[in-house]
Image (cartoon, rainbow, N blue to C red):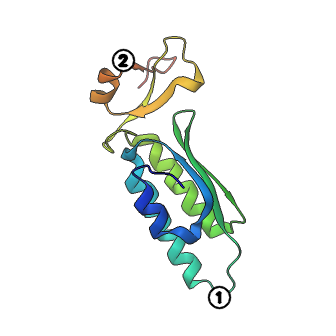
């Protein structure tokens, strides 16, 4: 188990997570992850034939929220997909409205992160512009 800011969330929704769960992202996405866990927990409790659903890892991958899981039905997949889509527009650091920035001028995928403008400036991230000049 981890001693991250997500420790309370992991203990509150212990049945959803693998024992050695890793949550590797900043706490700006905490509300998204918490709402996702609440919805999944509610769905599993309400289900008369529950499967063995389990979240293995939650991380920042290519700048957005990535959730690895086992044995999800269509409803759980939709909840997880919605949470991942919310991360495309939510600052990973503070939870405000954000967009994808890159810490490298060469636009290396491993250096992407969703940030608000203030945190992008603070961490020296570059704005990613559309090739045709659109934002």
Check disc 1 and report its element: helix, strand or loop: loop
Residue 126: give x, y in percent of width and height. 41, 18
Task: Reply above or below: 45 against 10.
Answer: below
Name the side, left or right, on which 117 lies relative to 89: left
Identify the disc placed on residue 124.
2
Residue 32: give x, y in percent of width and height. 42, 55
Quarter-of-image position of residue 20: bottom right
* 3 or 5, nearer to the observer: 3
Q: Residues within 10 Å of mark 2 (few under 14, many from 20)?
A: few
Residue drawn at x 34%, y 25% is 120
Q: What is the quadrant of the N terminus in the image?
A: bottom right
Task: Reply above or below: 82 against 26.
Answer: below
Name of the residue lying farthest toward the bottom: 48
Residue designated by label 1: 48
Q: Are marks 1 and 2 in contact (CB under 8 Å)?
A: no
Check disc 2 and report its element: helix, strand or loop: loop
Residue 14: give x, y in percent of width and height. 53, 68
Quarter-of-image position of residue 97: top left
Q: What is the quadrant of the C terminus in the image?
A: top left
Residue drawn at x 55%, y 82% is 45
Q: How many marks?
A: 2
Task: Reply above or below: 89 against 37.
Answer: above
Name the side, left or right, on which 7 lies relative to 109: left
Of the two numbered discs 1 and 2 on the same chain, state the one appearing first in sequence.
1
Residue drawn at x 41%, y 48% is 29
Q: Residues within 10 Å of mark 1 (few under 14, many from 20)?
A: few
Report, in whole angstroms, how far the alpha carbon at label 1 lies from the one at label 2.
Answer: 50 Å
Residue 8: give x, y in percent of width and height. 41, 62
Identify the disc placed on residue 71.
none
Name of the residue lying farthest toward the top: 105
């Amino acid at each position: 188990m981890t001693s991250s800011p997500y420790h309370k969330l992991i203990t509150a929704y212990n049945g959803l997570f693998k024992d050695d769960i890793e949550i590797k992202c900043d706490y700006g996405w905490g509300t998204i992850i918490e709402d996702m866990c609440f919805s999944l927990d509610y769905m599993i409790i309400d289900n008369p034939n529950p499967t063995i659903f389990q979240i293995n890892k939650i991380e920042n991958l290519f700048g957005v929220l990535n959730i690895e899981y086992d044995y999800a039905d269509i409803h759980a997949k939709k909840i997880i997909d919605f949470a991942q889509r919310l991360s495309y527009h939510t600052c990973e650091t503070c939870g405000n409205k954000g967009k994808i920035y890159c810490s490298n001028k060469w636009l290396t995928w491993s250096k992407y992160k969703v940030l608000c403008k203030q945190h992008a400036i603070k961490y020296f991230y570059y704005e990613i512009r559309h090739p045709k000049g659109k934002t």
